[in-house]
Image: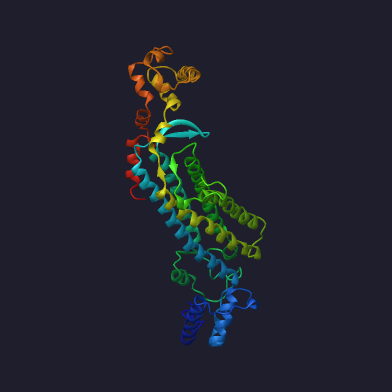
Amino acid sequence: MLAKVGLLKASELRAIVGALERIESEIEQGRFKFDIADEDIHLAIERRLIALIGEPGRKLHTGRSRNDQIALDMRLYLRDEIAGVIALVAGLRATLIRLARRHVATIMPGYTHLQRAQPVTFAHHLLAYVEMLGRDRERFVQAAARTAVMPLGAGALAGTTLPLDRRMVARGLGFKAVTANSIDAVSDRDFVVDFLSAAALTQVHLSRMSEEIILWTSTEFGFAALPDEFSTGSSMMPQKKNPDLLELIRGKTGRVIGDLVAMLTVLKGLPLAYNSDLQEDKERVFDALDALKPALDLFAKLWTALRFDAKRMRASAGGFALATDLAEYLVGRGTPFRQAHEIVGAIVRETTEAGRTLEDLSIAELRQHSSAFGADAIAMLRAENSVARRTIEGGPAPSTVKRRLKELGGR
């Protein structure tokens, strides 16, 4: 670009590009000698460039400042990293979709307040995470779009009097837009916050996922068995199989949330334009990526390796989890919902005190509480029937889940 606008001769351009390619090779091969006196990577490269080609190397910094250079570097780096994160999110999401296809008819209890609530299908439960990850992907795509804006040419804060062609540089670097305000260009780290916010929420989703698998693989739940390669033993208790990987992912969530809060705290007191406080952005981004990327990759492998106990899931999905079905049965026969709720509540209390479950009841016993119960009410006391009837859009019925899986395709 400098050559195109007449600020470099053709011979100088060739010398600079050739020397920069040599410097790149030296860095990649570990032969580049860094000197702390150079202050930063930009001056280190410029020093080496001048040593290699002399006077033309002094023209490299024409129209540039370290302020707009580092803003550009951060955008280039994050643009590539976000693309990688999006691919990892997509991979985990695809894994969950494949698993859901195999468990459309697998019945399990759904929970509220960590108490058994109503029966659902395992596929429906898995698709809840698919929805979460879909929103995560959207946020990263949006963050990527706001990152892909080219700041070079803003200089220290006020641009330059030189006839630079910013659009040419943007095209060469693969950016579709350039920054519209030179002050904002060098001081803006909103795009870093966008990434960290998306990363923190994604990590929160992975933490929730970790907690559920930890519960499911406990003896108390027994819904799944933890593979040896994703667990550790106890140094004292030979029978233990600990979900350390999941606990570490859950624990690192605090780090990623902390990275977001730290970056916001850096920004909240800064006047315009550039301030050295902004150097904190890199540590926050590096740390978040170091936690998030391995977690996404490992989760895709873990879901594939887990072995689920469908019988144990089904056995936990009946009993009092079917109480709402009985209440809705009465509503369907004209009983006001609040009255139906009270009737079924009385049935639950009476059955509990007798040490029985709803599935043990006969029609005669149900009719003692309401004459609205017909012979078909017994069908309400099977988890499979309960789930199959929940065909409302977004519901857990196998027919509804199949439609959603068809909409998702391989995504």
Question: Nearest the camera: 254 or 248?
Answer: 248
60 up-or-down from 315: above or below: below
Question: Nearest the camera: 175 or 294?
Answer: 294
User: Could you say where residue 325 lies in the image, as x and y percent from the top left?
Assistant: 41, 25
145 up-or-down from 218: above or below: below
Q: Could you tell me if residue 395 is visible in this image? A: no
Total labels drawn: 0
Q: Report the colour scheme.
A: rainbow
User: Could you say where residue 254 lies in the image, as x and y percent from the top left?
Assistant: 59, 50
Q: Residue at x 56, y 88 (%)?
A: 54
Q: Could you tell me if residue 216 is visible in this image? A: yes
User: Could you say where residue 303 lies in the image, as x and y percent from the top left?
Assistant: 42, 48
26 up-or-down from 191: above or below: below
User: Could you say where residue 410 lies in the image, as x and y percent from the top left?
Assistant: 34, 50
Indicate left or right for 17 with 283 as reference: left
Question: Nearest the camera: 124 or 186?
Answer: 124
106 up-or-down from 99: above or below: above
Question: Nearest the camera: 312 or 121?
Answer: 312
